[in-house]
Amino acid sequence: METLIPWLVMAILAYLAGCIPTGYWLGRLHGIDIRDHGSGNVGATNVFRCLGKKLGTLTLIVDALKGLLPALAIRIWLSSWFGDAVHEASMMAAAMAVVGHVWPVTMRFRGGKGVATAAGGLLGVVPAAMGPAIAVWIMLFVLSGYVSLASMTAAVTVAVAAWIGYGAETQCIPAVVSVLAAIALWRHRANAIRLINGTESRFQVLRRHKTTANSK
């Protein structure tokens, strides 16, 4: 039982870190409920579109840190809690932060899509796999202008890269990365349908409070 306590503490704290509703709070500070504008999503893309570059960038950074910091905390300060399983524990902390972002108790379990939080967490655990994913995201976003297409393709890329780069050492880490990729794809299912139908909106920063029908 004692060996489970560090894992439970880690899971709860990482989940609560993920529950911080960055986009929602920034919207409230500027007089709006971000859920009533654009796509209604609380993630960085909708904040970019509805509140501008500065607040969108701040949301992106904070959401990424929600995943990165719990993962690094395990490896840097709490490694003695987990012994030889420190890398697996760091991966689970990143995953729980994503779960908190996507299904936050602070927002009645209606959160963002988890891409920024997952990117931050995975950067702290599997940086070699994140390199190709980031490159793919940038390339597709620049070429197409679709955040959703770039995000979904990057999710698949990081899962494949994790199996190639880490699968020989442990199957736990790439398996969890694959689950996070599946969550990202599931959360983008509506975007995927719009991409197929040709009705998905390309990314652009809108003026404050202006809405868009097919935003992320």
Image (cartoon, rainbow, N blue to C red):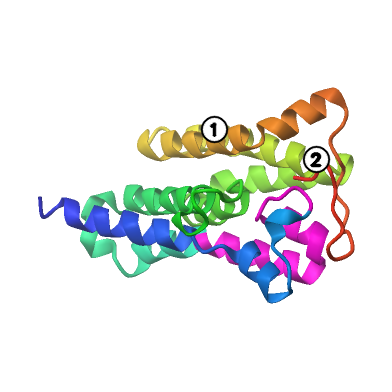
The picture places residue 103, in percent across and down from the top left corner, at 49, 48
x 28%, y 62%: residue? 79
Res. 144 image quadrant: top right
* 6 left or right of 138 in image: left
| Residue 48 magenta | yes
Question: What residue appears at the point 48 percent right and 53 percent down from the top-left corner?
Answer: 104
Residues drawn in magenta: 38-66
Q: Position of residue 177 (x, y in %)?
A: 48, 39
Q: Amino acid at mark 2?
A: Leu
Instruction: Indicate whether residue 64 is drawn in magenta.
Output: yes
Q: Local crowd at mark 2 within 10 Å, few (<14), some, or many (≥20)? A: some
In the image, residue 31 above or below residue 85? below
In this view, the residue farthest toward the bottom is 29
Of badges 2 and 1, the one in the foreground is 1
Whether the residues at callouts 2 and 1 have beta carbons within 8 Å, the answer is no
Q: Residue furthest top?
A: 196
Given residues 126 and 193, the one toward you in this image is 193
How busy is the neighbourhood of tag 1: few (under 14 within 10 Å), some, or many (20 plus)? Answer: some
The relative height of residue 210 versus residue 114 in the rendered view (above or below) is: below
At which x and y percent is residue 193? 75, 26
Judged from the image, the secondary structure of the residue bearing numbered disc 2 is helix
Callout 1: helix, strand or loop?
helix
Image position of 193 (left or right of 212): left
Q: Residue at x 84, y 35 (%)?
A: 200
Q: Main secondary structure of the magenta part?
A: helix
- Give the residue number, with chain letter if any, for mark 1: 182
Residue at 87 percent of width and 31 percent of height: 199
Q: What residue is pinned by disc 2?
A: 140
Is 149 displayed left or right of 188 in the figure? right
**Quarter of the image with the C terminus in it:** top right
Q: Is residue 78 left or right of residue 195?
A: left
